[in-house]
Structure formats: C-alpha cells, structure tokens
Image: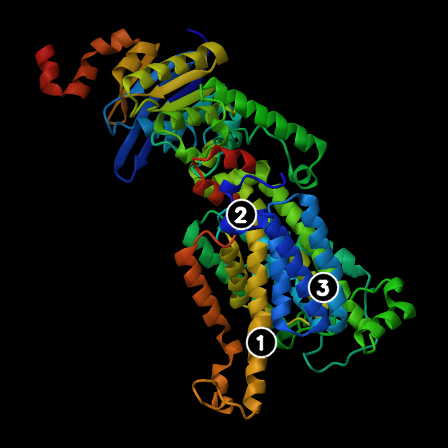
Amino acid sequence: MTASLLHLDKVTKRFGGLVAVNAIDLEIVEGSIVSVIGPNGAGKTTIFNLITGIYHPDGGAISFDGKPILGKRPDQITALGMCRTFQNIRLFANMSVMENVMVGMNCRLHTGLFDTIVRTPKFKRLEEVARAEAQDWLRFVDLPKGSGNQVAKNLPYGKQRRVEIARALASKPKLILLDEPTAGMNPQETEDAMHLFRRLRDELGITVVLIEHDMRVVMGISEWVTVIDYGQKIAEGTPDEVRKDQRVITAYLGLAHGEAAA
Amino acid sequence: MSAMRNDNLSPVQRWLNTAWGVVGVIALMSFASYMMIQNPRSLPWRLAFLVSLFLIFYMPRHLVVKIILGVTGMLVIIPFVGISNPFLLEIGFQICLFAALALGLNIVVGFAGLLDLGYIAFFAVGAYLWAFFGSQQIWHLDEAPGTFQIYPTFPFPALWFWMFIGVGIIAAAFMGIMLGTPVLRLRGDYLAIVTLGFGEVIRVLLNNLDKPVNLTNGPQGITPIQRPPLPPLLTSAALLDWLSKIAGRPITGNDIYGFFFYFTALIVLCITIVIAYRLDNSRIGRAWTAIREDDVAAQAMGVPLVRTKLMAFALGASFSGAMGVIFAANRTFVSPESFTLTASISILVMVILGGLGSIPGVIVGATIVTLLNIDILQTMSLALSSLRQGSGTIPLLGIAWAEIPTQLDPARYQRLVFGLILIIMMIFRPEGIIPSKRAQLELHEEDPEIAEREEI
C-alpha cells in the first residue's frame, strides 16, 4: 500500500434523531479506483457531502493530502484538489458547455477585478488559455467538437454526465468523487464511461472514488470496495473479497437469503 | 459582421437588415431631428428621435456605422435641440442617470440573481455624501433645521466634486459590503425582505439625523449644494452669444450646466456599460451566473459564495454611489423623499422590463420608464389641462373637456401604467424587451450558428 490521499476518522453525521453516517473510517489510497457501495439510503451521498464540505460532520476528522479539511468551505476544499460530480446532474443549465467547464477553473484562474475592468493583457492571455484548456477537457471526455457552444441543458443525458466530469477535471483535482456516474446509462454508455474512469487514473493520475449501483462497473474497474449500510461500514476489500462477504450479501439481499446461503 | 444571415434575426432586425431598413432608419432619424429642431417642445418628434436611436443600436450592421450614427444623435443633435429646449437635456440626463443605476442593479439581480429591493439606499449614500461635503451643512452641525442662514461661501472647493465621484463609489461599495456580509447567507425572499428593510432604514436615518447632530437636515433636505466649476471655455462670452442667437433667448452659465450634466452623465453611463459588459464576460461574471443557476454546485466547483455575492453587491452599489454624487450636484438639493421604496422598485422595473441580465435591455427599460415618469405622462397631463381650460368638447362623446375631473390626470396614473405594462410584459414577453443573450440562446438552442456568433 502506498500513501493515503484521503482519510476519514470516525466521521459521524446526524440529521435530527437519524444517524446518517455513524463513525465511519475510510482510507483512500493515492492513485486507486475505489467504489463506495451500499443499499439505497445507506449514507453514501452523505459521506460525499461530508468530504466535500457541503455538510459538516458532528464528530470525527477528515484529512486530505495530509491536511485536515474539517470546517473548510466547499470552494476551499475544491481549491485543495478535490472535486466531485452529483448524483442528479447539477450543471449550470443555462450556461454554455464551455462556460460550465470554465466555472470549474474558477479557483485556478487568477483574473482579479482590476484585470477584468481594465482588460489587461494578463486578462486576455489567461482568458484565452482557459478557453483552450476547457476545449481540451471537453476533448478528453470525448465530447464532439463544437459542443462547447451548446447550452448545457440541451445536451443528451449521457453527454451532460461527461460535461460534469469535464467541469470537475477543470479544477485540476488530485481526487475526483463521482456520485452514481453511470446511473441511467445504457450498457454501451456504461462501457464507455468505465473506459473514461480508467483513463482519469491512468492518463491523469487522478484518484477516483465512485458511488455505484451497477455491479458490473463496481466489479469491473474498482481496486477497492467499501460497503456502507445504515451509515456504517460493514465491509471493505478487493471486489472479490467483498462479493463473498456474508454481511454484504445480507445487506443487499436480506437476512433470510443470507442465512440460506450460509 | 455586416449584413448577417437573415434567419436568426427577429422580424424587426430582418427589416433593418435590408437596404430599405438602413435608409428608413436614417430617414426617420434625419426627419425626426429636423422636426425636433423646428418644434423643440413637441413630444412625438422627441419620441420618434429616440426610437430611431434605438433602431440604430438594434440594426445588425457594422459597429462603426452604428457608432457614427449614434454619436451624431447623442452628441450633436440632442445638444443642438437642447439649446432651444433645455428640457431635452434634462430628459437625457435622467435617462443616463437611471440607465446607470439600472445597470448597477442588473449586476446584483440580473447577473448574480440576488433580489435587492433597497438598491436606492446606495444612491442615497452617494447623494448625501456630496450633499454634506458640497454644501454648508458642516457649519450647521449644532443648529436645528430651518434656523440657519445661507452663506455666500462653501467650506470645501467645488472642484472636489470630481474626487467625490470616486469617494461615492468607494462609500457605496463599502455600504454594499456592510449590508451584504450579514445577509447574503439568506436566500431568495428572505434576502429581498432584508434589503427592503435596509433601504427603509437608510431613508428613515436620513429623515431623523438632524438631531442630536444635524447631519442631514432632516426632512427639509440639504440645499444649496455646490456644482463643479465649469471650464472657462464653456462660459466664454463668445460661446454664450452664439448659443443665445440660436436659442433666441439669453443663455447663461446656468443653461450651460444642462449640457454639462448631460455629457457628464453620458460619459459615466458609457463607462458603466463597458464595465458591466466586461464583468459579464469574465471569470467573475461566470461565477455570478453559476451562483444564480445552482449555488451548491457553484461552491463545489470552487466558487467562494459569500465573496462572489459580496462583489456583486459592492459593484452594483458603486454604480449608484457615483450617480448619487452627480445627482446631488445636478439638483443642488437632496431630501429623503427621493430615496423611497417606490424609487427602488422603479429601478427594478427598468431591469425586468428591459430584460434581466441584458445590458442593452436594461438601458431600453430605463429609457422607457424614465420617459413615462418625467415626459410622456406629464406632457399628456399638460395637454389635458390646457384642453380643460378651453371650451371644446370631446369628439364623438360630446362631453366638454372642462368637465373632465382632475382625478383623471394621466400623471396620477403613473403606477397604474407601470403595473399594466409589467403585467402585459410578464404574459407576453417575460424575458424582457431585449432578452439577455443567454435567454436568446435558450430560444435558439438547436441552432449552432447563432450559438457560435453569440460566442458566450
């Protein structure tokens, strides 16, 4: 095992009386592809929201790249090199695809108010670089040429997912969190998406964490799987280990089946 | 650029794109100018002239052509007619003033999507700033309103006016940040209510800060306020003589101020337009739009919410701070009455009517609302009252004009007219008179050609 990039230590989140995430420990190794799985309502998305600073945990500690990130705002966490996509696509619907990607560069683009109002050479240069770079990201996620000028909401669903990934990539993350990135895709699209996730790691060296329901994706690309149920980690290991884990089978298929299998 | 493809254009633009359109607009402008010079006080020709100015803007022709025609209209014809009819310069001044205010509010409401119902407060900050330092108020701090006399001199030189435009910008931006810091965590309706309250707080403060220290002179307002000194060139005897000859009446330095403020407001408006446009097409503008679209996603993509919103508030406020200083100098008098909730809403109406987020739209909106406010309805009232004095009857109905009660005075129905216009707009064209390019893109979504041209 190499260095750990993201570390969760006994992180807990309560919503009123409901304990959505209960003392979870999580270790994401740099350069790996990790899946977080679990039945609906297990608390997977809540964990993502805790990691990215949208929620604040009631207990525990989170560190990223060796630095504690507890209490930081989402935009600060993004600037540290962690970015995400959302379960139900949250593109800026009425902005162009290009603009969407350029918003992702916000924390890296240092054009201040003065540069903007005066249109300094620096502004023009940076804006041009940003535009070219956005084009590169769109190409990386295999969007056809010219789609940059389309309004985001007019793209078909599968392409919107890709734009969301391109937007996240534009912040140059070390870690990308993908929340059900293949939901609603047909088998061919899912296949292409898996290929893309692998390229994120292989070509860009980005650590990938996915929340997934599609077991072909989970088993096909992840090197490590963490299983969550009722806000608790019930198992983790390689896909093969998890597949055979009794508690996982129980969580997914119910106790009776689990006992019968045993 | 010149003579664009026809199929992406609105019917009006399509007509303007033909040779007839260009000739027609130039003919309309020339004819309206001529008639305006002949009848400097006639409302219809004034309106025809303004319409021709906007058609020029709307014309899908080369920018240079548009600029030449526009500059001729605004820098030559309006001032020339203004020699005979100073009211035209006053209209021009007010349109520029309100257009700049509306552009400022457009940054907050249109770009960043934060509903601000107390925007006039920032205008008040600018106006009272120069009212205080540009008048003798500083000598009357311990005297009650109405108990002191007016001195022939002022505590500070009038030339400071120019510096105070800058001070007004900074002060209003500072107020924007002060207001924004605690309230920008609120969303939608809550933010609107708090800003509404803030606007009222400022007005009430201005009303009551005559005790214990007389800072604002209370409801009586501050007067006289200094105007900036005119450059000697503009007050030379030769120029005044020449202008008097054209106008057919003696032109004094006071009349020159009409030109002076018209041009000052026009210059400030132009700067405002450039700044608004540049902000919109930048990282900052994209961050504002992103926040308006989805603030959770925007923050997750690295946009600092509070700082970006504060920037919108401060920049929007700074526009109106600058205009406040100019307003105080132009009027030589300010009182809390100019800064009511109705005034805030009036500016909001300009933005919504013209097109949220659309810079040309907001300017058109400001023009229409200002014209209705100070020109069209007033002129109709005047016409009605002069008919009432006569002995004529209404054609067809046979009722004597004199019998029309004063309650039917059109100027009294200002708000009603606005209300009706807004309702009609919301039903038939909710995106505004000239929608923002984003709204336009939505309408022409499947056409890559227009998307490329828009180049957003």
Q: Are marks 3 and 2 on the same chain?
A: yes
Q: Which residue: 23% across, 10% down?
A: A243
Does label 1 or label 3 sit earlier along the sequence? 3
Quadrant of the image for the N terminus of chain A? top left
B293 in relation to A160, above or below: below
> Where does residue B361 sit, x and y in percent of width and height?
55, 53
Dot 2 crowding, Cα within 10 Å, few <14, some 14–19, many 20+:
some
Amino acid of disc 2: Arg
Q: Find out whether the residues at labels 3 and 2 contact each other: C-beta distance under 8 Å.
A: no
Task: Give residue B378's mark.
Answer: 1
> Where does residue B372 sit, x and y in percent of width and height?
55, 68
Quadrant of the image for the C terminus of chain A? top left
Distance from label 2 to label 1 (Cα)? 35 Å
Amino acid of disc 1: Gln
Distance from label 3 to label 2 (Cα)? 28 Å
B99 or A50: nearer the viewer? B99
Q: Which residue: 21% across, 16% down?
A: A248
Q: Is residue A242 visible?
A: yes
B269 or A215: nearer the viewer? B269
The residue identified by callout 2 is: B14
The residue identified by callout 3 is: B78
What chain letter is assigned to the residue under label 1? B
